[in-house]
Amino acid sequence: MLNHNEIVELHDGILDDLQVEKLFLYLAYNFIETLPTNIFDNRSLDTVDLSNNKITVIADICKRCIICHLLVYDNPLNVTHYDKILEFGKLNDIDITGLDFGKNNSHGFYTRKFVIVLILCLLLSPSSSQIISNF
């Protein structure tokens, strides 16, 4: 576990000497901005948690790799790369969790904060049926 370690960058080849069949890599709550190209090449990873970092782009992180769960919550990901990220996930059968598409986007997703606010409004509003019909 490497969560909360103030890690700023990951160097090329950082995983090269690991001889582990199924890797769980927890790098949440650090200061990582970029990932080295092909950092996960030829690896089998169960979970990669990159949540709460400063990552703007997830592209070319692996070829011939297996990642079951990729968590990217609360990163300032560039929305222009979402299609590439989703395509990468589909092609490699990766469960990518935490993409924040925002409200009114082409993907039809909503942010977690928006959904929480909407639920609170519905619970607290005397005219919740009106809100639902307008939604």
Image (cartoon, rainbow, N blue to C red):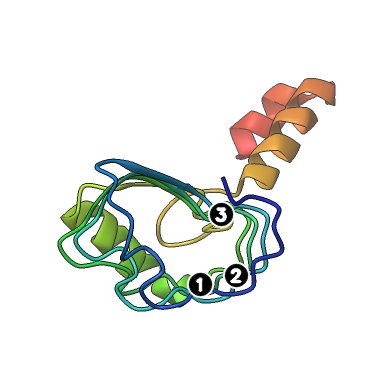
Residue 43 position within the rendered picture, expressed as x and y whole percent measured from the top left? 24, 55
- Tag 3: amino acid: Leu
Expressed as whole percent of the image width and height from the top left, the position of residue 113 reads: 69, 45
Are there few (<14), some (14-19), or many (20+) residues within 10 Å of tag 1?
A: some
Q: CA distance from mark 3 to mark 2?
A: 9 Å
Q: Front-most of 127 and 21?
A: 21
Q: Quadrant of the C terminus?
A: top right
Is residue 135 shown above or below 43? above
Precedes in sequence: disc 1 or disc 2 = 1
Kindly state the secondary structure of the residue where label 3 is placed: loop
Mark toward the start of the polypeptide (1 vs 3): 1
Q: Are marks 3 and 2 in contact (CB under 8 Å)?
A: yes
| Location of mark 2 (residue) | 32
Could you tell me which residue is drawn at 49 percent across and 61 percent down? 105
Q: Residue at x 47, y 77 (%)?
A: 11
Gap between marks 1 and 3 measured at Cα: 10 Å
Q: Which quadrant of the figure has residue 37? A: bottom left
Q: Which residue is mark 3?
A: 27
Helix, strand or loop for disc 1: loop
Nearer mark to the viewer, of 1 and 2:
1
- Residue 73 vs residue 105: left or right? right
Please tell me the numbered disc located at residue 78: none
Query: Can you tell which mark lies on residue 10?
Result: 1
* Residue drawn at (26%, 67%) of the image: 62
Q: Amino acid at mark 2?
A: Ile
On the image, which quarter does residue 55 sit in?
bottom right
Earlier in the chain: of badge 3 and badge 2, it is 3
